[in-house]
Amino acid sequence: MLINMQRFEAGHRVWGHNFLVISLTALLLGWTQARFGWIECMGRRFYRGSFSAEQVPTIAKSGVSKIATFSLIAFLAQAVHLPCDMVVSGGTGLSDWLVRPLWPFSDLGFVWALIPWGDVGPTVILMAGAIGIAKRPDRSASLASITLLVLCAYLGVRGWSRGAFIL
């Protein structure tokens, strides 16, 4: 985007939105977490004196299982982004962007543009859900379900208003 929108449109969703890049960055994040423990370092920095060393949970003891655990978490967290970008696409002056999850092995791309890029609705819905869960952790499962239901309804209504559904 800093260079120009056409280059962004041509490259970003290809180079940054595929399973190869997701796998490589997940492995890098898993290795750096196992080697340097940056999550714990950030936690100690933000919560100085709030927790003792015994209160900080650990996921795995050995280096290989730490790398595997954090890499899997990083992979899943990034992979969720692909279907989200498949339904958030296009907009005023922008074409619908294909997401090519199998690049560079295949140029097969997917898009189902339900809402235009830049629509703040999903962000507002997800942030409201996160705030609700933070305020009421005892109801996190039901609040997460309600948030997901509202998000899906929003996507459906916005997609219908853009003509994304053929009835």
Image (tube, grey):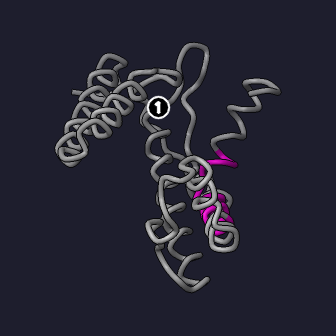
Residue at the spot x=66%, y=58% of the render?
21
**Which residue range is magenta in the image?**
14-28
Q: Quadrant of the N terminus?
A: top right
Rendered location of residue 91, percent (x, y) = 53, 19
Q: Is residue 77 above or below residue 152?
A: below
Residue 107 at x, y = what percent?
A: 62, 53
Residue on which disc 1 sits: 88
Q: Dot 1: within a 10 Å radius of its alpha carbon, few (fewer than 14), some, or many (20 or more) residues?
A: many
Q: Is residue 15 magenta?
A: yes
- The residue lying at 20 percent from left, 37 percent from top is 146
Q: Position of residue 29 (x, y in %)?
A: 64, 63
Report x, y in % for residue 139.
18, 44
159 sits left or right of 167 in the view: right
Q: Amino acid at mark 1?
A: Val
Q: Nearer the viewer, residue 29 or 112?
A: 29
Quadrant assignment for the C terminus: top left
Question: What residue is drawn where x is 49% and y is 79%?
Answer: 60
Q: Residue furthest front?
A: 49
Q: Provide the secondary structure element on which disc 1 rests.
A: loop
Number of numbered tags placed on the structure image:
1
